[in-house]
Image: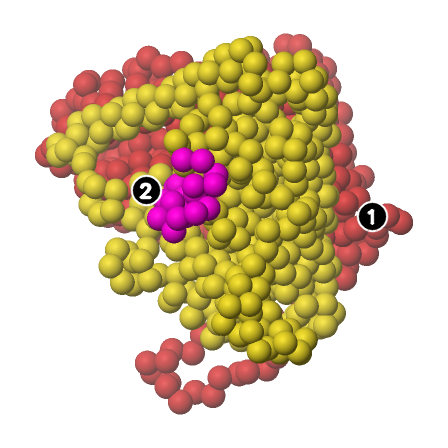
Chain colours: A yellow, B red
Amino acid sequence: MWPLAKYVLENYLPRASNTTAQAMVYLLFALVGAAILLGFASAFAGVSSFVERRVAARMMSRVGPNRVGPQGLFQFMADGLKLVLKEDLVPAGANRLLFRLAPYFVFAGMFGTFVALPFSARLVAANLDVGILYILSITALVVVGIILGGWSSNSKWSLFGGLRSAAQIISYEIPAGLAVLVVVLHAGGLSTQAIIEAQGGMPWNWFVFYSPFSLIVFPVYFTAALAEGNRTPFDLPEAESELVAGYSTEYSGFRFVVFFFAEWANLWIMSAIAVLCFFGGWRIPFVTVAETYSAWYWILLGLAIFSLKTLTLVFLVIQLRWTLPRLRVDQMMNMCWKYLIPIAFVCILGTMTWIVFVGQDTTLGRATRIVLFAAGAGIVVRQLVRTSFNYRADRANYRKMTGQPLWYPPFRLP
Amino acid sequence: MTFNELSERLRTKFGPDAAPPAEGAPEALTVRSSAIQEMARFCKEDPELDLNVLSCLTGVDRKDRIELVYHLLSYRKRHELVLKAALDRAKPEIPTVETVWKTANWHERECFDLLGVNFLGHSDLRRILLPEDWAGYPLRKDYVAPTEYHGMSHARVNPLHEPEAPADRKQAELKDLSQLKSLYQPVAGEMVVNMGPQHPSTHGVLNFLLVTDGEVMHKAVPHIGYLHRGMEKMAESIPYPGYMPFTDRLDYLAAMSANQGYAMAVEKLLGCAVPPRGEYLRVLACELNRIASHLVATGSMAMDIGAFTPFLHWLREREYINDIMEEICGARLTYNYMRIGGVSHDLPDGVADKILRWMDHFAPITDEFERLISNNEIFVQRLAGVAAISAEEAIDFGLVGPNLRASTVPWDLRRNMPYSAYADFQFDIPLGQGFRGTAGDCYDRFVVRVLEMRESCRIIRQALAAMPAGDIRAKLPRRLKVPPGETYARVEAPRGEMGFYLISDGQETPYRLKVRTGSFTAMSIIEKLSHGVMIADLVAIIGSLDVVAPEVDR
């Protein structure tokens, strides 16, 4: 937004020379940018909540929301409206101020990351020089909100949830940060756009296939991101069967919405970070960075590519949530401190060595990238084959049981 | 050993007049109340008697005395013995046998609660089903039910007849749990958390008082009785056939087995035989019901561990069973299918095909379930090695059914003391063997249930293939004349052995009915298992023991 504001000031408002007027223009652009991002985050959170419920329903062989709007698409609006209209309860004995304040911390921690999160070339609210570090650090605000909410609710189950969450998020920030550091080593810069620009459009030019270590470190990042986002199998802070609803047990109405808004918006954030760090971001095959910056259609294509990659990961995360059970607290901590952090450290050292001794544009470096890409593609193909096997087994079984074929397009229900 | 050999063995040890046969019950021995501990220990430890199981401990108000009844059973020798002790009605006291069998702890507490028997030397003699401040002992024959409890009237105004009746809105002054709290005074660093009565994973209305240090549990004290409906008391005022629908409500997930247990008890007293087709239909219904019950047990266990999808897949399968049940007996949950002397309806046309088609469909679905959750590494890690129960411990605490078999005890009433038509069928008894951890852990209990479903399918196929023709019900008069006497009928319900101890005095209603359920004893071991585990493990333990609240409280 800043370059845009500067451009407008210089070309269209040359007479706004005094600093107050300039500041007003900057403020205006900041507000417009914030509004656009908030609109995007809300729309994404809402639609992804709907998509998650429908995907979950399909996985569990039930119907899912299908009443409000076409195929139930407006269910999230109805739910949001209902929740906003509910009474804003504060339990007796709760610390009223902190209880009311907590959701805002969670919201700020989530929404703050959008500032440095790119959508395409030029499409970023602020291309900070320390972008990725900023993103990693501002998400720590979420844990403040969750602890506040858990503690101030005056409920022991909330307190358990808050403390579990604190332990979890703080622990898993370390492997997440270390994994991102591997990417930073490859990219040679902390800015989110610089990281994307250092990658290429073709899959073997993505950072995930740059060296064996970055291929290993991607699962580390992904696991840590799941844990930071309180997604299954790391949904211990809100473990329903253990802690009722964890830190959000006592919340109702709008404040409850904010917690869940943050959770679903976080789906985009964690996937977008993975895409920009490991999967080439908005880079278009056969188009250079300079070309992408120069034309609006390349920018839009980049946006489409970035969104497609991100949504694929979002879909994967949703499927994981409805497949896996939950870890126990000690297992969760073991996994972080005994496995992920050592692996991440080894990967950092390995990457350093790799960059010094092999490099990216040597024959060995290129050959490695092709081999790793083949391995990665093999894993994906294997999963798809397995999925189709299960689907066909299901279909045959269904036909045998009911006597009619099981087929319905993904957007329609039986 | 036969009853005569058993009593002879006791007499050679304790003297010729130590254990005379009890009056009115030919298969029972009377013992002096002071000698009960010694006698019980001998019964348990003597290698020839080897009565290592206390199946049931209860009391009966005989108007002139209080009679305590101990049902003993030997898993290895497959014989049973009933001991009786007569107590002074004004001041019933008897030494506890808690030191011999740990399961006696809860049984004696229940006996104290409902009959006012004082067990000398008992470690924790408190009311268990009724509130702490309840007055009187309901199962005594001279008990008069109070009309109100803390301002809550027991009578309901009929809104059709008296629409304008002023509702008594007096605020109920309920006693809080202060008395309970004083029992578990936390030391420094401990926190007391209430889990339940409303909690997602207590499977009904249960309350656990968790004494924890952060996530690590020091103790979890179960507090039951929220669903106590006085089933046993109600039986005393309802004619024999009319009590059948009540047994449905004992264990709402496995109503068929409760039906069958009660019907078997009455049939034993009547001495009437069920026609073969009736027996086969009973087996068919019970096994279908067992699958449905295990579906909920394993599915909700997966849900407790955090995987929601397997649970709903299982509920979908259960829905098919419910449809089949609806066609067989008209109901989907509380079947009321059995009658004394048989079953209520014959198998409708086409249902046999439907069952077979469903089972063809169910086998690959079970494979899918095992791929999805049983072999999921997170799931295995959560359950393997958690809360392992050894075989001795399981017997000591009176665990029954799949929980007992998971602890490697090869005991299944269907095989070891065949009732109904089970002797006709070929099936295996899955035992826990430490599939992924130690034998008798939560994972074993889970796997044993999944395997049992496959075995039940085998039984159903055989029953359908060999279904005899003929009557489905014995001819019995509408008003049953049950001869005086007493009996103890055991069935292998999905939650383990369900015992119906029925006493008749020749009237139209039972004199006393005691139901011994698997969930009740399973609950009693939780306090022992909960020491040192984490909160998430407690949820897994409750799920793996498959406790159903109404069956605990009756």
Q: How many callouts does the rendering have?
A: 2
Compared to residue B31, the image places residue A67 above or below, namely below
Compared to residue B12, the image places residue A333 above or below, namely below
Which residue corresponds to the image point at 68% horizontal and 58% vertical from the top-left? A145
Disc 1 on helix, strand or loop?
Answer: loop
Label 2 chain ID: A
Instruction: Specify the label residue B395 is tagged with.
Output: none
Extreme left residue here? B349
Q: Which residues are magenta?
A: A287-308
Extreme right residue here? B188
Within 10 Å of disc 1 (Cα), the crowding (few <14, some 14-19, many 20+) is some
Residue B326: horizontal and vertical position, in percent? 23, 44
- Residue type, label 2: Arg
With B322 as the anchor, is B87 left or right in this view? right
Which residue corresponds to the image point at 69% horizontal and 55% vertical from the top-left? A141
What kind of secondary structure does the magenta stretch mostly adopt? helix
Which residue corresponds to the image point at 70% horizontal and 22% vertical from the top-left? A352
Residue B202: horizontal and vertical position, in percent? 56, 47
Q: Report the front residue among A191 and A230.
A: A191
Compared to residue B490, the image places residue A96 above or below, namely below
Q: Report the front residue among A352 and A403.
A: A352
- Residue type, label 1: Glu
Q: Would you name the residue on which mark 1 appears?
A: B190
Q: From this viewpoint, is residue A210 visible?
A: yes
Which quarter of the figure is the N terminus of chain B placed in? top right
Q: Would you name the residue on which mark 2 appears?
A: A58
Label 1 chain ID: B
Residue B73 image-quadrant placement: top right
